[in-house]
Amino acid sequence: MIKTIGKLLVALIIVGVVWLFTPRIIEIEANPKIAPTNLNKEVDYKLLLKQEVERQGLTTRDFLILTAISDCESGGKQFNKDGSVIISKGNIGFFQINRLAHEQTYKAMKLDMAKAEDNIKYGTMLYKKNGLRDWQKWSGWCFEPRIQGIK
C-alpha cells in the first residue's frame, strides 16, 4: 500500500514537472490555423514559429529547439510591456537578430525585424542554414541544457 502511494506521488510529480516545462504546443498543433489575434501573445509567437517551421520544411524537433533559443534570447517575446520592440545591444526581437551582422541580408529580403512574423521568418531561416551557430556564443549556455534531450 505504501509503495503504491509512493509510486503515485512520484508519477504526479513527474506529470507536474513535464506540464511546467513543456512548451505550450498542444493548442498550436490542435488548431494550426487559429488566427494569432485570437490568442495571447505568448502562444501567438509560438503559433507563428510553428507555422514558419512547417513552411520551411523543418520538424517538431526544430520547433522545440527554436523555441528554446527564443526563450533564452528574448523570453519568447517580440515586444516589451509598453509595446516597443525588444532591442538589446543592437539585437532585435524574438530571436534577437543582430543588426550589424544581418541588416544587409534581411533588408535585401524586404524583412523588418521589428515585425514578429519577419523576425521569426529570418530566425528560422538562419537556424535552417547555420544550425545553432548564430546564437551559440551568446545564449548557448541557456538553451543547450534545454535541448539536450530533444529527439
Image: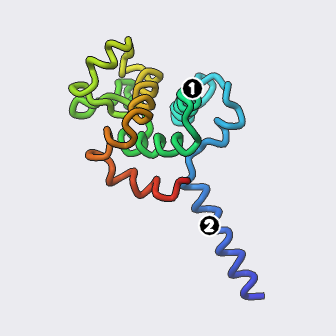
In the picture, measured across the screen, residue 137 lies left or right of residue 130, that is left
Amino acid residing under circle 2:
Ile
Q: Please tell me which residue is depicted at 55% across the width and 53% down the height of the picture.
A: 151
Amino acid residing under circle 1:
Arg
Looking at the image, the residue that sits furthest to the bottom is 2
Q: Residues within 10 Å of mark 1 (few under 14, many from 20)?
A: few
Q: Please tell me which residue is depicted at 56% across the width and 47% down the height of the picture.
A: 23
Image-quadrant location for residue 95 = top left
Q: Is residue 17 above or below residue 129?
A: below
Q: Please tell me which residue is depicted at 46% across the width and 40% down the height of the picture.
A: 66
Looking at the image, can residue 80 be seen? yes
Disc count in the image?
Answer: 2
Q: Please tell me which residue is depicted at 73% across the width and 81% down the height of the picture.
A: 5
CA–CA distance in space, label 1 to label 2: 34 Å
Give the residue pinned by disc 2.
14
Query: Of the numbered discs in the image, which one, if any, rests on residue 146?
Result: none
Give the residue pinned by disc 1.
55
Image coordinates of residue 118 in percent, x first then y, are 43, 21
Image-quadrant location for residue 55 = top right
SS for tag 1?
helix
Image coordinates of residue 33 in percent, x first then y, are 67, 25
Image coordinates of residue 37 in percent, x first then y, are 59, 22
SS for tag 2?
helix
Q: Is residue 42 above or below residue 35?
A: below
Mark 1 or mark 2: name the one nearer the start of the chain. Answer: 2
Image coordinates of residue 89 in percent, x first then y, are 21, 33
Give the quarter of the figure containing the N terminus: bottom right
For discs 1 and 2, the disc positioned in front in the rendered view: 1
Looking at the image, the residue that sits furthest to the front is 129
